[in-house]
């Protein structure tokens, strides 16, 4: 029986967890309801809501990922959103609010810190961490005596990125990646996230602790106010609304928005019924292009479809007399933290760039409040020109090689580029933008393979493109939008298992832009995952000879060399990448694999243990340490490592597979079969687990149970890696 539990080079990629039906047609009744609601809100006068300073009132922050400002019913959108519309009627709805970045992590860092991206330093969804000493809403409210909790819907806000500081509870249990060949994330739906938040609030409001020996004081509800942040991810692509919303909207995105509103309703009801004064802030982190200016999702451009967001601020409680207000003042994400601090009676740090929106006068002010924004993904991941810009009043200026200026008052769709028509106005806005003093992003930190796979599953194409001294019109994202679309088409083709077409797509990109490292990496990835090991290595070696010797290209090449049996060459490539104080985690993992393949178990162990100093919850490093102990026959130690890996990530297929090997070697065939069955459920491409499970069942005389697993192995295992095993399996199937 083969052991087949070797150290793996990456953690498997995720899929969306909830099963959802296909999209149906929009219901006419829903459309009518939305139109009526929109008319009610648009027709209201400019009344002033009664927002007050209430010392130590509770604070509920709700961030809805990928939420366009025009998606909600109260903003005239298509989705029926009665819960959020009611909240807007109870407080202030800002109809000209904007983010400062068009990606999840940088945008949330601005919301929590009250600072622009160039100030807090988080410029992309990967490679950056919020500084350990950065004050946030959580740290400031915690210092003021608040109980704090966060409930997170998806990986871009994982605690590893630094947002968890100050929270007593930071619940980001959405699972590790599964198969690296999948591009769908196990999205934790809003219903689940909201249920966790409601449970925390309920338990906190009844008993501070449990047990028969509690004193009367300990059994009383906690007197401390609370700050709860709820992040829901559902409107993010892919759009798969659950029933009944899947059948009610022609555009699936609107169904996701409506479903999110329904999921949030019980939470808002709980807060209202509790009676205690509570400030509620709801916003989107960014919008969604939905085809606007050629962009399907978000991250590349910063047009209003992705930059403008809803913002609703309301105070609820027994003393509140709800008054609806619509404010057209320019509101910004950097204004949220000052508003929260002001509302609870805390001082606002003088160095914050935003201002409180609590006073009515601030919501009537007509003086322009310039707002900085950026989109750095194209620069960091593709090597294209960086995008920065400024909003001043209703004027919008985008600094790119092909500059853009729009008058949003008369051109909300940004259809007419006014740059060059009034040079004085162009220069004034460009000067105001330069006054922010925003530097380009600094060196990014490498992410481990698990993080890369997760972000790729969300459609975030990450890389480490080198910066240029000068960018021209050829580097402008507008010029290159077709290549961006082709990159995403390559992913779609791969997911659809149309591998030759995916390979052709990436080859076409390389022919047009030979300097795009990410195209070489994707092409090599598709070749490798389809069993073309030599072709994958050739692609990466060609990239390096072309002058693209980035850390990610070198690491991928080194890992493939190690897996292909050339451990010495892999070690030579990877060792230089791991000697810095902030080592490339991906390179570390690849180097550990190379050492293991070369028979240098002690060196491999040191590398994997070093990975745990970077991320103590790395299921991949834990499982690889288990494999090393399995190699030397220490079953108790191996079991401990694999159990720790499962504890860190219950969805780690490799960890469950390792436990299966330990069980079989320990004489527990039933436990081994159970562990491998779980591993195969979690990752249909864990070929080692498929092989072990099928062969073990067959050896047990249960060929009928073994046959489905053996057939899957025979049909899908890459011959380049499993030729001998495939011959053995086919002989068994012939019986």
Image (cartoon, rainbow, N blue to C red):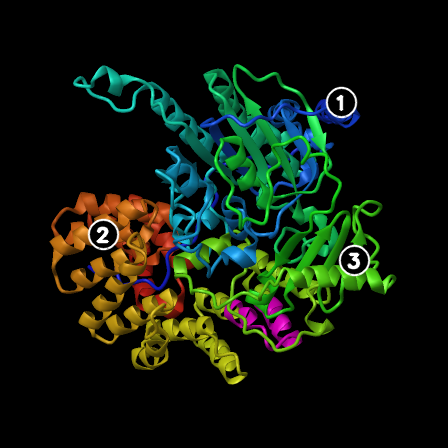
Q: Which of the 4 image quarters holds residue 140?
A: top left
Start and end of the magenta stretch? Answer: 503-522
Main SS, magenta residues: helix
Q: Which of the 4 image quarters holds residue 470?
A: bottom right
- Alpha carbon separation for disc pair 2 and 1: 58 Å
Q: Nearer the viewer, mark 2 or mark 1?
A: 1
Q: Which mark is residue 40?
A: 1
How packed mark 2 is, by other alpha carbons closer than 10 Å (few <14, some 14-19, many 20 or more), is many
How packed mark 1 is, by other alpha carbons closer than 10 Å (few <14, some 14-19, many 20 or more), is few
Name the residue carrying label 2. Answer: 642
Name the residue carrying label 3. Answer: 405
Q: Secondary structure at mark 2?
A: helix
Residue 654 place in picture, x, y as percent? 30, 54
**Is residue 536 toward the left or the right of residue 563 in the image?**
right
467 in relation to 222, above or below: below
Residue 60 place in picture, x, y as percent? 49, 31
Q: Nearer the viewer, mark 3 or mark 1?
A: 3
The quadrant of the picture occupied by the N terminus is bottom left
Of residues 348 and 729, the one nearer the viewer is 348
Is residue 378 in the magenta section?
Answer: no
């Amino acid at each position: 029986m083969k052991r087949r539990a070797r150290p793996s080079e990456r953690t498997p990629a995720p899929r969306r967890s909830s099963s959802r039906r296909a999209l149906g047609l929009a219901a006419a009744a829903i459309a009518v309801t939305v139109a009526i609601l929109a008319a009610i809100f648009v027709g209201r006068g400019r009344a002033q809501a009664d927002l007050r300073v209430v010392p130590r009132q509770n604070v509920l922050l709700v961030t809805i990922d990928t939420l366009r400002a025009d998606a909600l019913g109260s903003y005239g959108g298509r989705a029926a959103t009665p819960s959020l519309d009611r909240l807007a009627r109870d407080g202030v709805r800002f109809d000209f609010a904007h983010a400062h970045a068009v990606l999840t992590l940088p945008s949330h860092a601005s919301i929590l810190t009250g600072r622009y991206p160039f100030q807090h330093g988080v410029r992309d969804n990967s490679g950056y961490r919020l500084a350990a000493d950065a004050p946030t809403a959580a740290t400031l409210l915690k210092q003021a005596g608040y109980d704090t909790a966060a409930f997170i819907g998806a990986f871009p806000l994982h605690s590893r990125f630094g947002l968890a500081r100050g929270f007593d509870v930071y619940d980001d249990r959405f699972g590790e990646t599964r198969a690296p060949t999948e591009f769908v994330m196990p999205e934790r739906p809003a219903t689940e996230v909201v249920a966790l938040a409601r449970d925390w609030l309920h338990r906190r409001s009844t008993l501070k602790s449990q047990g028969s020996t509690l004193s009367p004081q300990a059994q009383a509800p906690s007197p401390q106010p609370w700050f709860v942040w709820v992040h829901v991810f559902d409107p993010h692509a892919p759009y798969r609304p659950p029933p009944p919303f899947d059948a009610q909207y022609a555009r699936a995105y609107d169904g996701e928005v409506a479903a999110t509103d329904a999921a949030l309703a019980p939470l808002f009801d709980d807060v209202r019924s509790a009676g205690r004064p509570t400030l509620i802030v709801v916003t989107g982190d960014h919008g969604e292009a939905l085809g606007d200016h050629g962009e399907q999702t978000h991250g590349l451009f910063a047009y209003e479809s992705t930059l403008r967001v809803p913002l609703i601020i309301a105070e609820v409680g027994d003393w509140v007399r709800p008054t609806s207000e619509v404010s057209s003042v320019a509101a910004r994400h950097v204004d949220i933290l000052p508003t929260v601090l002001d509302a609870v009676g805390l001082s606002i740090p003088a160095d914050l760039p935003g201002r409180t929106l609590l006073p009515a006068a601030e919501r009537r002010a007509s003086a322009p409040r310039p707002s900085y924004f950026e989109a750095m993904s194209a620069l960091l991941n593709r090597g294209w020109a960086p995008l920065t810009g400024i909003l001043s009043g209703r004027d919008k200026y985008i600094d790119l090689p092909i500059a853009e200026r729009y008058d949003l008052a008369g051109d909300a769709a940004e259809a007419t580029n006014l740059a060059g028509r009034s040079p004085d106005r162009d220069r004034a806005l460009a000067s105001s933008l330069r006054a922010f003093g925003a530097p380009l992003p600094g060196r990014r930190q490498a992410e481990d393979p698990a993080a890369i796979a997760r972000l790729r599953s969300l459609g975030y194409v990450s890389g480490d493109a080198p910066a240029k001294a000068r960018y021209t019109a050829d580097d402008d994202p507008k010029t290159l939008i077709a290549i961006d679309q082709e990159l995403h088409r390559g992913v779609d083709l791969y997911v659809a298992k149309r591998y030759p077409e995916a390979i052709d797509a990436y080859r076409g990109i390389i022919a047009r832009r030979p300097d795009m490292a990410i195209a070489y990496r994707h092409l090599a990835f598709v070749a490798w995952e389809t069993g073309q090991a030599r072709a994958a290595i050739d692609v990466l070696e060609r990239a390096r000879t072309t002058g693209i010797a980035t850390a990610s290209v070198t690491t991928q090449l080194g890992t493939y060399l190690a897996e292909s049996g050339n451990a010495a060459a892999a070690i030579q490539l990877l060792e230089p990448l791991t000697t810095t104080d902030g080592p490339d985690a991906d390179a570390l993992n690849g180097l550990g694999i190379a050492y293991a393949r070369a028979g240098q178990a002690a060196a491999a162990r040191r590398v994997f243990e070093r990975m745990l100093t970077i991320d103590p919850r790395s299921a991949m490093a834990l499982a690889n340490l288990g494999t090393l102990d399995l190699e030397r026959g220490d079953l108790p130690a191996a079991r401990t490592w694999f159990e720790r890996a499962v504890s860190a990530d219950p969805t780690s297929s490799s960890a469950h597979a390792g436990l299966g090997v330990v069980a079989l070697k320990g004489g527990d065939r039933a436990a081994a079969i159970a562990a491998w069955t779980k591993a195969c459920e979690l990752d249909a491409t864990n070929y080692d687990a498929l092989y072990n499970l099928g062969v073990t069942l067959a050896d047990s005389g249960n060929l009928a149970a073994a046959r489905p697993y053996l057939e899957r192995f025979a049909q899908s295992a890459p011959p380049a890696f499993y030729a001998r095993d495939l011959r053995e399996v086919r002989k068994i199937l012939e019986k």
